[in-house]
Image (spheres, helix red, strand yellow):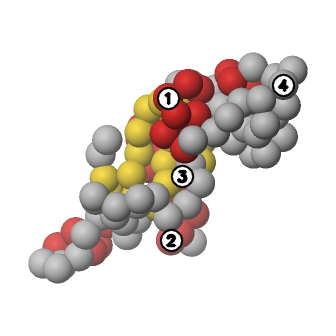
Amino acid sequence: MPHFYTDPSREAEPYSLPDAEAFRADAGELAEALGWEWEQTGADGSCDEWDSPEDCAPAGFYVWSCFPGCMPDSEPTGPFETETEAVTYWREMFND
C-alpha cells in the first residue's frame, strides 16, 4: 500500500512523512479492514441486509489520510479506476 504526500513539495523536507495512502480493495477486504458488518452498515452507512457488499463498496482504488505505521485518520474515498486517479483526486481536494 503506497503512501504519498498530499503536498508533493513536502517530499524534500527531511523530517516530513507521507500523509496519505492509496490502496486497492474489493468489498470484502474493505469490510474486513474497517470492521464493517454488512448486515448493519456499509461504506456510507446506507447498506442494509438486502444490499450486497459490492453495492456498498465496489472494488477499486481507495485513498485516505494515513501516516506510515499508523491507523487511518479518515474514511476511505473511492473507488477509483486507477491508483493515479485516487492520488490526483486526493491532492486536488487538499491543495485547491
Q: Quadrant of the N terminus?
A: top left
Q: Nearer the viewer, mark 4 or mark 1?
A: 4
Residue 50: x and y, percent? 87, 21
**Looking at the image, do the residues carrying marks 1 and 2 touch, with CB atoms under 8 Å apart?**
no
Q: How many marks?
A: 4
Which secondary structure, mark 3? helix
Which amino acid type corresponds to the residue marked 2 in the rendered image?
Asn
Which secondary structure, mark 2? helix
* Residue in view at x 73 percent, y 38 percent: 42
Of the numbered discs 3 and 4, the one sitting upstream in the chain is 4
Q: Nearer the viewer, mark 1 or mark 3?
A: 1
Residue highlighted by disc 2: 95
Q: Is residue 84 left or right of residue 54?
A: left
Of the numbered discs 4 and 1, the one sitting upstream in the chain is 1
Residue highlighted by disc 4: 49
Cα separation, mark 1 vs mark 2, equals: 29 Å
For residue 89, which numbered disc appears in the image? Answer: 3
Which amino acid type corresponds to the residue marked 1 in the rendered image?
Glu
Q: Quadrant of residue 35?
A: top right
Badge 3: residue crowd in 10 Å (few <14, some 14–19, many ≥20): some
Q: Is residue 87 left or right of residue 38?
A: left
For residue 29, which numbered disc appears in the image? Answer: 1
Q: Quadrant of residue 57?
A: top right
* Residue in view at x 84 percent, y 40 percent: 46
For residue 12, which numbered disc appears in the image? Answer: none
Cα separation, mark 1 vs mark 3, equals: 22 Å
Q: Quadrant of residue 41?
A: top right
Residue 19: x and y, percent? 36, 65
Cα separation, mark 3 vs mark 2, equals: 10 Å
Of the numbered discs 1 and 3, the one sitting upstream in the chain is 1
